[in-house]
Amino acid sequence: MRTIVAGNWKMNTDRASAAALVDALVKESVRFGAQAEVIIAPPFPFLAMAVEKCQGTPIRVAAQNCHQSEKGAHTGEVSAAMLKSIGVQACIVGHSERRHYFGEGDALIGEKVAALLAQGLTPLFCCGEQKEERESGRHFEVVTGQMKGALGPFSNAELERIIIAYEPVWAIGTGLTATKEQAQEMHAHIRALLHTHGASVAERVPILYGGSCNPTNAEDLFAQADVSGGLIGGASLVAEQFLELVRIASNVSSSRQ
Ligand code: PEP
């Protein structure tokens, strides 16, 4: 399995800085090698531009959110079909910021996953526990609940089209990172949950780590047996750092062959 490096730009950049960031990645993309898969998730207004600039490169463009309905009276929302129509290939769902600031729960997140799959887009499904949940030893239970709550209804063929990102909430944007042991044991747990749907689901679904991942800690994290790459926030906004993460991912992948 190739190592995936996905950049979540969140509500950052403007037209000029988004263009400059995509240009910097596109310029270096000839050096990505076949071993690393690169996804960027710019804000909605810059998606079409990013898709255009990334055409003919190995970089895939993702959205950061979508609505669960196909169309209709949902002022301010964006559908999976709209994303598909401009060439977006994937979409983040269930990010902790959407769960906590926008009240999105597992059932709604599952509906968004279904909407994306129906359009042939790749859902990048995030899960992860909060600080108190880890401190009280409930982190496995919480992640199991999120996985079952959102992904329970899907067939094996559908599950195989999803990318999962484990993002402990206490590590997102805080500078705190899960240790490689903490990451590996949760990724193994998620892999085991996938295994209940069959060996091929467990083998095919990439599980990314997210939470203050940067060029200093990435090698240790990406090298863990059940870690298939990273979902990167802050470090994805600095071209040199993101490119360094892609280089590390590529090396880790090559050494696994
Ligand atoms: C994220 O929000 O998905 C994330 C991983 O952010 P950061 O890398 O900044 O912790």
Image (cartoon, helix red, strand yellow):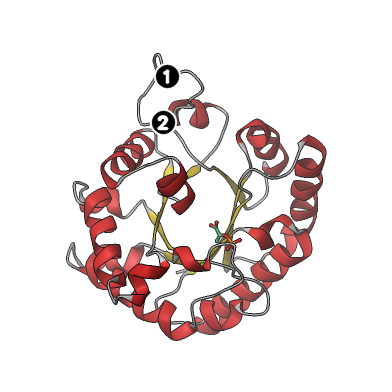
Who's the residue at 78% across and 64% down the image? 240
Who's the residue at 68% across and 72% down the image? 247
Tell me which label, 2 or 1, sits earlier in the chain.
2
Q: Residues within 10 Å of mark 1 (few under 14, many from 20)?
A: few
Q: Name the secondary structure under disc 2.
A: loop
Report if the beta carbon of the residue with label 1 is closer than 8 angstroms to ligand 1: no
- The amino acid pointed to by label 1 is His
Q: Is residue 167 visible?
A: no
Q: Are marks 2 and 1 in contact (CB under 8 Å)?
A: yes
- The amino acid pointed to by label 2 is His
Q: Position of residue 3 (x, y in %)?
A: 52, 68
Q: Residues within 10 Å of mark 2 (few under 14, many from 20)?
A: many
- Residue 223's place in the image compared with 40, above or below, is below
Q: Position of residue 135 (x, y in %)?
A: 36, 76
Residue highlighted by disc 2: 67
Residue highlighted by disc 1: 74
The answer to whether 44 appears left or right of 101 in the picture is right
Q: Name the secondary structure under disc 1.
A: loop
Q: Is residue 218 visible?
A: yes
The answer to whether 139 appears left or right of 164 in the picture is left
Q: Position of residue 58 (x, y in %)?
A: 63, 53
